[in-house]
Amino acid sequence: MKSSSRPESILQALQSSPHRRFNPLTREWVLVSPRRTERPWQGQTERPEPESTQPYDPNCYLCPGNIRAGGARNPSYSQTFVFDNDFAALQPDVPAVQLDVDGKGILVAQNESGICRVVCFSPRHDLTLSKMSAVEIRSLIDVWIKEFQSLGRRPGVNYLQIFENRGLMMGCSNPHPHGQIWATSTIPNEPRKEHEALAAYQKPHGACLLCDYIKLEEASGERLVCGNEHFVAVVPFWAVWPYEILLLPKRHLASMTALDEPARSALADILKSITSRYDDLFQVSCPYSMGFHQQPTDDLEHREWHFHAHFFPPLLRAATIRKFMVGFEMLGSPQRDITPEYAAEKLRQAGLTPSE
Ligand SMILES: [Zn+2]
Ligand SMILES: [Zn+2]
Ligand SMILES: [Zn+2]
């Protein structure tokens, strides 16, 4: 590649031929194989049957007043409701154990302690983030912040993962709007990769990787999806999932707890905007996994951390066509067919007037 070439023209040239892109947050590569002859959007506009969920489902273990599988009864909550997962994958008190057979670093294991909580976003069984009002999402954000602070203060809790798994396609069988918070004593793989990359960038550049990235995206505009005074949403340059979104605060903040009142409301607005765009683009209640990556809660200062959210919808070009990560993707590198620039354009056009 000639160094005299402008970045825009190099990217233009790459648009039509297979290339790979670097993810500076995980320091991994993704293969992009744009297919010029096979237009990705085939114009499927068939609307699947409307979902006929009711505001209250007597058989739902998350609806107000109902009995959960573990036997506990939910209160008649009117906004949000948080409880310890009855079938938690993590337990708070596990004996400390370390294994390293013959000290070779091959058969290595250690105990992991933690807490799993469930957050019901709303008492309404039939809502989604996209259908909740910005005011309702705002009170959910306040709950996330409160949980982050109280769980993060507990001894032995060094990382908190707030996430939502939505839709059968993502393995979530209950449509009731809810998410989870897993508190762990160690930093899980994905945020740990980012943690190391953010710290490694800060030293030589004297700047934050994501602050610098926002400037590049705002200058180009090609991958911007939506934004407001406090947040910007992009299809990241290195996106793996077809319509993946990275949501970033414009200010350098290590966690949600640093958001002031206007910024919390701005976060509610943009969460609604993103999820509405997904629903509009696929004409269904779009499945996805989303979650926030924030600074560890290990009582250390984390000036390198720039908190953000990832959205990973599994859909490729219609509600019934999902992307699979198999073959080369399992054994080589992740691969995508449509370019992030194309996906961003589609998402910009979608959901311009979110329906209430
Ligand atoms: Zn329910
Ligand atoms: Zn930053
Ligand atoms: Zn992240």
Image: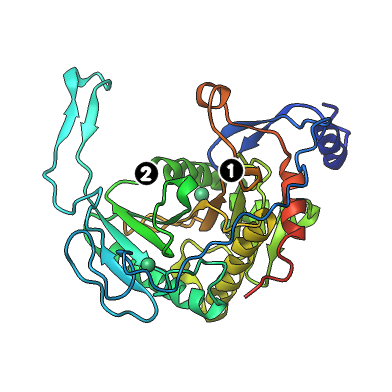
Amino acid at dot 2: Pro
Q: Please tell me which residue lies in front, 305 or 191.
A: 191
Q: Quadrant of residue 324?
A: top right
User: What colour scheme was applied to this rendering of the protein?
Assistant: rainbow
* Residue 211 visible somewhere in the drawing: yes
Q: From the viewer's perspective, is 336 left or right of 271?
A: right
Q: From the viewer's perspective, is 274 left or right of 106?
A: right
Decide: few, some or many residues near mark 1? Use Cα within 10 Å; few <14, some 14-19, many ≥20. few
Q: Please tell me which residue lies in front, 35 or 269.
A: 35
Q: Is residue 247 above or below residue 337?
A: below
Determine the residue positioned at 48% across, 53% down.
167
Amino acid at dot 1: Pro
Please, what secondary structure does the residue beneath circle 2 have? loop
In this rendering, the count of numbered labels is 2
Residue under label 2, please give it. 188
Q: Please tell me which residue lies in front, 344 or 28.
A: 344
Determine the residue positioned at 49% across, 69% down.
127
Residue under label 1, please give it. 204
Please, what secondary structure does the residue beneath circle 1 have? helix
Q: Is residue 145 above or below residue 221?
A: below
Give how far across and how far down residue 10 sits, in percent.
Answer: 84, 35
Decide: few, some or many residues near mark 2? Use Cα within 10 Å; few <14, some 14-19, many ≥20. few
Q: Which mark is residue 47?
A: none
Q: Quadrant of residue 31?
A: top right
Q: Nearer the viewer, mark 2 or mark 1?
A: 2
Give how far across and how far down residue 128 sits, in percent.
Answer: 51, 66
Q: CA distance from mark 2 to mark 1?
A: 25 Å
